[in-house]
Image (cartoon, rainbow, N blue to C red):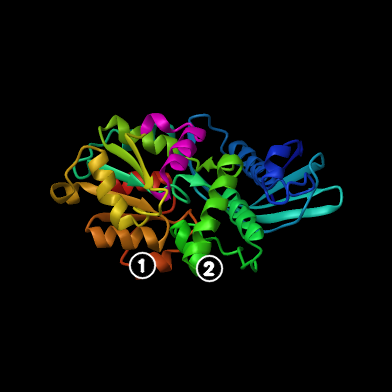
Amino acid sequence: MTEKTVFQKIEQPQLASAMGSGSLDVLATPAVVALMEYAASSLADELLGNKELTTVGTRIAIDHTSPTPVGAEVTATARLIAQNGRTFEFEVSAADQKGEIARGTHTRVSVKAKSFQQKADTKFNRYTYVLFDLDGTISRSAEGIRASLEHAIKQLEVPMPDLDDYTAYIGPPLIDTFKNLVGLDDEQAEIGAQLYRSYYRRRGKNLNYAYEGIEELLNALKEKGCKLAVCTSKYEPFAREIVEILELSQYFDAVCGSNLDGSRKDKRDLIPYAVASLGGNFERDRQATVLLGDTYFDTKGAVECGVDFIGVEYGYGTVEEMKREGAKLFAKTPADILTLLNS
């Protein structure tokens, strides 16, 4: 069985300290996950042996992680378990001196760079306004969101809910998360949201990473003249900062999010706002608008607004939940989004 092993000394205290207690003796999760992804990427490149190929989509699912101190030497291994053309599935794991600290699976899709560009050159006749959800569609953001939520709940001194299911709090408006998941009343939920935003502003926002293939997709859409907007229930200034952190600001004509008072938090309100921010007339331009998202909240908003929707399978939501809200088209990778927009 083909495998690749890489090594790294974890020296990212700013990531580790952002994960909860402020101690440096916490798992630097993004660094470990990135190392496992790098092992898989290196192995895929060796197997393909073709510099003309470009990666257009990845997905990693972590089964478990265990604490390891910053400064530990971590070994990450990727083992090929299946290959279908240029689609690879790897078993990935990481270990420090004490033993295994993480394990999961990693799927990687590569295409010929020339072929990807040919798709980009196809004329887009249907959609003028392409709206992107942020968390789980553009950005891998779970670590920062969870750390900020944990901090707020601890400060409130209320019982900590199970946060292992990201779908429970990545996608819904923040106030709704504190009400429905944590069980707070309106006043407490507002205090929780303030605590969350304060921590997220200082630490959580830095734990955002663009999905592979997203920048190529955005570039292709911009080259064909599409108007692009981020359409997220996240507080709008935070959304702008995250797009800047991801170094994707040059592709978006607008970044649209919620207000500090919690208004404009639902997609049914955000979608018309985003189209207007792009210079469109929502009533006139519904048929020229498409929303890309990863949760049933995104699907529901698109259906309520009467615009087309494409669900992404690589995010935090589930296909089943999106289907229940009426979603019909799904993309496994950003490259698939380009194909669907061309169809």
Residue 207, given in percent of the width and then of the height, sits at 59, 43
Q: What stretch is highlighted in magenta?
A: 232-251
Name the residue at 15% across, 51% down: 283
Q: Foreground mark, 2 or 1? A: 2
Mark 1 burial class by Cα count in 10 Å: few <14, some 14-19, many 20+: some
Mark 2–mark 1 Cα distance, whole angstroms, equals 30 Å
The answer to whether 67 appears left or right of 129 in the picture is right
Figure disc tally:
2
User: Is residue 8 one of those drawn in magenta?
Assistant: no
Q: Check disc 1 and give the amino acid type.
A: Lys
> Can you say whether 305 is above or below 259 in the image?
below
Horizontal and vertical percent for residue 180?
49, 69
**Residue most toward the right?**
98
Tell me, yes or no, if residue 343 can be seen here: no
Which residue is under mark 1? 323
- Residue 171 horizontal side relative to residue 157, left or right: left
Image x and y of residue 108, in percent: 54, 47
> Counting residues from the N terminus, which is met first, the one under dot 2 or under dot 1?
2
Q: What residue type is labelled 2?
A: Leu
Q: What element carries label 1?
A: helix
Q: In this view, does 59 lie above or below 243?
A: below
Residue shown at the point (24%, 55%) measured from the top left: 307
Residue drawn at the location 45% of the way across and 44% of the way down: 138
Tag 2, which secondary structure? loop
Whether the magenta-drawn stretch holds residue 240 is answered as: yes
Query: Among all residues in the image, which is located at the extreme front?
Result: 187
Asked whether 324 or 237 is in front, the reply is 237
Q: Residue 184 carries which label?
A: 2
